[in-house]
Image (cartoon, grey):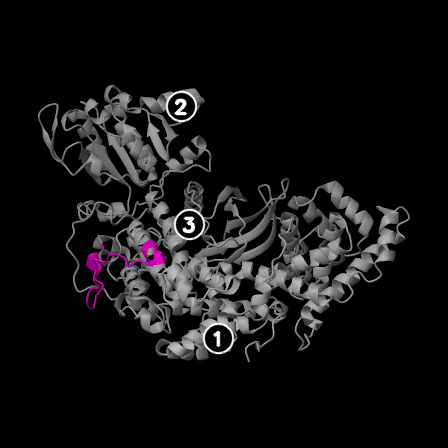
Amino acid sequence: MARYVSGNLAEMEADRLVRHLDSCNDCQRQIDDMSRRADSLVAAIRRPVAPARDSQELARLIAKAKGARSEENTPALTSDNKVEPVALDQFVACLSKSGLSNADEIAECVRELAPTSSIEFANQLLAVGKLTLLQARALLRGRWRQLVLGNYAVLEMLGQGGMSRVYRARHLQTKREVCIKLLHPKGPRTSEHKERFAREVRTIASLEHPNIVVAHDSGQSESIPYLVMELLDGSDLAKLVAAKGPLPPDSAIRYVLQAAKALEYAHSRGVIHRDIKPHNLFLDDTGKIKVLDLGLARFDSVLQPSNEPGFSTMTKTGMVVGTVDYIAPEQAVDARDADYRSDIYSLGCTLHYLLVGRTVFSGETLMARLVAHREEPIPNLAALRPGISPEIKSVFERMVAKCPTNRYQSMTELVADLELLLAGDSPAFDWEPPVQEIYELEAVADAETHADLNALTLAAIPAPAHRPAHRPVRPASKRQEFRVPKPVLYWSCVGAGALACVVLLFVAVTSFFPEIAGTVGLSNSPRAVIVVASDGFRVSHYQAVTKALNDRAIPFVTASTRSGDAKADDGTRIKVDLTIDDYTPRSSDGVIVCGGSVHELKNTDLVDRSLKGGATVLGVGSEGFAPLYSQYHLAFKESGVEWDKKLPGGEMIQAGNGYITKACDEGGVPTMVDHVFGELVSK
Amino acid sequence: MSSQSDATSLSLLQRARSNDQDAWDQIVHLYGPLVQRWCKRVGMREDDIADVFQESFHAVSNHLDGFKPAKAVGSFRSWLRTIVRTKIADHFRKVNEQPVGRGGSTDQMRLANVADPLADDCAEDESEENALVVQRAMELIESEFSAKNWQAFKLVALEGYSAVEIAQQLNVQPQAVRQANYRIRRRLRAVLQDLMEPTDSDFE
């Protein structure tokens, strides 16, 4: 008992003792008695320690000394047999070209150190701290490119994923140390990939949340994009659990709650992580969780467009095998089916890992584990880890329900329950785990999106017995033209790179308008929302817009102030799919406002909300549209921002998180639709 | 239930030796204040302290592989003190050798006066130093535990309340308080292996 009180008892014995304590009041009293007295540890704890007056100085000293170990470990460079080091003069030339030091400095070093070989010089520079090992090795191989990225000197590699490498780097002038993520030099490097990476970079740059890693800057080097982020001290949760074993339930819940809050925010901005796992949750020195790889993950794991055969979630796109352990069933089938609830599933799998120390499903092969997500029953958490309350177990099971509709439907719901758990209250569950829940593909919104499953995935996951007979809105031939939209190219000229950019493609929003998901085709594709007044909208505008959209096979819905029908100025009635108030804008949306009776729309916050949500707003007919957007135009005028005049037939400008155009006339509709939806629709 | 894996049963030193950066960071975190304190005690200036501090930890890092902790409690701390003492002596020697020393004569005098500035501690110093390291260890592990558990532990360890009293105050079961106390003390001992007796015989 004494050893239990003092913390010396081994865990297993402690478990036994705890069981005994349950029924023995006498021992309880003895233990309580002992624990109040001071042993050597407690004596040290109780001894007052004068607070350090120079704690900042100490912190600085300590931070520096922490680095000592890795520097000490730097082995001296020797010539390895595989690669002959470059000659001294070439080494000096490379050093000069790299931008790590200027010519004067290098000349001075050569004079002072008087090296006789490149290896000797490299070791000398290592010793005086002028070069890091990574830099020296690269230079000895005659490589100097990308040792400086923008204003940052690359110091060492911190890690690498499937698509990218992560480096520690230092700003050349300010000396601030940062973390840089660079698209993997060996990864796919088509212009599409780069463009998509760049767009994702802008997405993450637009996210600002205490639990999301901060993006400082981004750029391109040798036409390979990179992202500059804050350098964090701490450990990711995968490493933490690997080093220390499963976490105490309270800590696990606290960490998951912080991640859930970050994702709740990201989801509100239309960003789905799609690669939530313990490795991507970073616990910093202050105990704060930072979600990593946000936005990039979508890029990392997304299925490539169907006209690139051979790409799959698991192979060439570089998704690491480990991710399979956290992937939602619907996402495993087709990454584009991932929606907000897929992140909830992955976070549930993460919670399991934090509490139990291993993944939810284990299987010899990747396939076995993938299938397990779909078919294996959810393990009983309480049986795997003693001390798990029924409440934690319920929350976990609801997070990892096979069918998205049985999960929490939003991060907000999950956050609320996690907070209740931490407060020690029972979440008010109105949810019972479905008996023997079987995952059905039909549960995922649109079976048509599975049309281009590749052979690998098909082999792994048997096709369902039948598929719902959804009529594809988009003809199969059109699907082949699904491409990355071009407007980004224009828009990047307009907006500062760090600002949010409209993400037209691959924002998976399966859950988005469940009532229309079956009819608009690809639920995660760009979509037009035509907005009309409920009475008196210009039929000619509407017809011009629908024709342009139909010609380009862009799915659309019609929104108005009232549900039911809307009446045009010539008496024509059209069906309204949803009311403006029910409309939740996404960055994949092009919101097209038709003229006529627009006063009716003035009282809505349609334009504000759309731009906040990252959508692009296009007005048809200036007489109606102008009042809606005049405030933006005025703001632009005051701030001296120029409209992008490069667009033939119209002008577009960044506003909120999205873009807004000047109103166009009926004749300009096709051109502006092309701008809004980009290359996607161009022949 | 194992909330601590084998990693903690290996000492920080063993882990640091196998190039576990986390373990090294923890060592620096734990003992950094001690090193600073020793430097201050001999009246060094901030700039000089910074040099000696870094040199000391460089030396620890360099010689970590060769250091074989004795069975005695505090052997790492003694070793560290030896290193710091050497580095301080080196520093003053360098200052002495400089014809126009930075602060020259006073530093020389200091060296002369403090022949062995870090001669073995008296018991009082040692327990104060222990407290300093224990406090650092508490900072190190606090984030691993919930606020409630931490509070429960502090009420037991610092304030000496009983499990039942604390349980009432925090609205938890008394056994939860005992368990929090056990876990946190166990974790602390794991971090503080060098300073603590392997088994505590205070009650036996």
Q: Earlier in the sequence, mark 2 or mark 1?
A: 1
- Mark 3 residue element: loop
* Amino acid type indicated by mark 3: Leu
- Mark 1 residue element: helix
Residue A423 seen from this side: yes
* Amino acid type indicated by mark 2: Phe
Q: Nearer the viewer, mark 3 or mark 1?
A: 1
Instruction: Kindly report the distance in space between the C-alpha atoms of the residues bearing marks 2 and 1.
Output: 69 Å
Residue A434 place in picture, x, y as percent: 20, 64
Left/right of residue A198 with respect to residue A399 in the rendered view:
right
- Residue at the image position 65 percent from the left and 73 percent from the top: B73
Residue at numbered disc 2? A636
Q: In the picture shown, does residue A559 fall above or below B162? A: above
The circle on residue A4 is 1
* Residue span colored magenta: A419-444
Which chain is home to disc 2? A
- Label 1: few (<14), some or many (≥20) within 10 Å? many
The quadrant of the rendering that contains the C terminus of chain A is top left
Q: Earlier in the sequence, mark 3 or mark 2?
A: 3
- Residue at the image position 35 percent from the left and 32 percent from the top: A659
